[in-house]
Image (cartoon, rainbow, N blue to C red):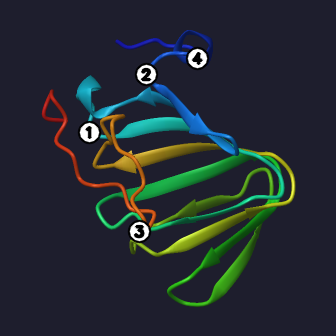
C-alpha cells in the first residue's frame, strides 16, 4: 500500500515546475503500478502547448477555468471544474488559462519524474527503474 500527501511531496524531487506551472508527481513509474498520477497547477493568463507522443494522459480539472485546443483537429473546448479530457489519440494540444487551474492527471505508461518537455512539448519515453 502507498499513502502519500502533497504536503510531504512539496519541495522534493517529485515537486517540479517553473514560474507559471507546478506538478506534484504523487505516483511515478518507480512505484510499479503501471501509471503515474500528478497534481498540476497552471497560473492564470498563461498558455501551454503539449504533445504526449509516448503517453496517454487523462486530466480532470478540479479548480479554475480556461480552454483546451486540440491543435490536430482545430477544435477548442471550454474547461471548468469537473471537466475531464483524455488524450487517447496523442493529440497536440494547448491549455490557455483564465484563472489558476488545478488538475489531477494520470499518465500511461507512467512517467519516471525525470522527464522534461522537449521543444515540441513531448515527454520522452523513459523506462522506470522498477519496470513500471
Q: Is residue 23 visible?
A: no
Which residue does the numbered mark 2 point to in the structure image?
13
Residue at coordinates 70% horizontally, 45% vertically from top-left?
20
Q: CA distance from mark 1 to mark 4?
A: 23 Å
Which residue does the numbered mark 4 point to in the structure image?
10
Which residue does the numbered mark 1 point to in the structure image?
34
Q: Nearer the viewer, mark 1 or mark 4?
A: 4
Pointer 2 with pointer 1, Cβ within 8 A = no
Q: Nearer the viewer, residue 83 or 119?
A: 119
Q: CA distance from mark 4 to mark 2?
A: 9 Å
- Marking on residue 88: 3
Pointer 3 with pointer 4, Cβ within 8 A = no
Q: Who comes first in sequence, dot 2 or dot 1?
A: 2
**Horizontal side, residue 31 vs residue 51: left or right:** left
Which quadrant of the figure contains the C terminus? top left
Residue extending farthest to the bottom is: 74
Q: Who comes first in sequence, dot 3 or dot 4?
A: 4
Q: Position of residue 131 (x, y in %)?
A: 13, 34
Secondary structure state at the residue bearing disc 3: loop
Amino acid at each position: 500500500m502507498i499513502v502519500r500527501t502533497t504536503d510531504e511531496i512539496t519541495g522534493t524531487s517529485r515537486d517540479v515546475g517553473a514560474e507559471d506551472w507546478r506538478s506534484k508527481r504523487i505516483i511515478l513509474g518507480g512505484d510499479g503500478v503501471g501509471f503515474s498520477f500528478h497534481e498540476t497547477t497552471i497560473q492564470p493568463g498563461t498558455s501551454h502547448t503539449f504533445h504526449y507522443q509516448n503517453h496517454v494522459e487523462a486530466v480532470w480539472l478540479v479548480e479554475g477555468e480556461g480552454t483546451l485546443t486540440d491543435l490536430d483537429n482545430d477544435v477548442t473546448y471550454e474547461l471548468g471544474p469537473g471537466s475531464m479530457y483524455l488524450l487517447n489519440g496523442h493529440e497536440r494540444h494547448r491549455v490557455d488559462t483564465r484563472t489558476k487551474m488545478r488538475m489531477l492527471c494520470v499518465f500511461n505508461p507512467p512517467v519516471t519524474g525525470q522527464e522534461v518537455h522537449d521543444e515540441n512539448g513531448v515527454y520522452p519515453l523513459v523506462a522506470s527503474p522498477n519496470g513500471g
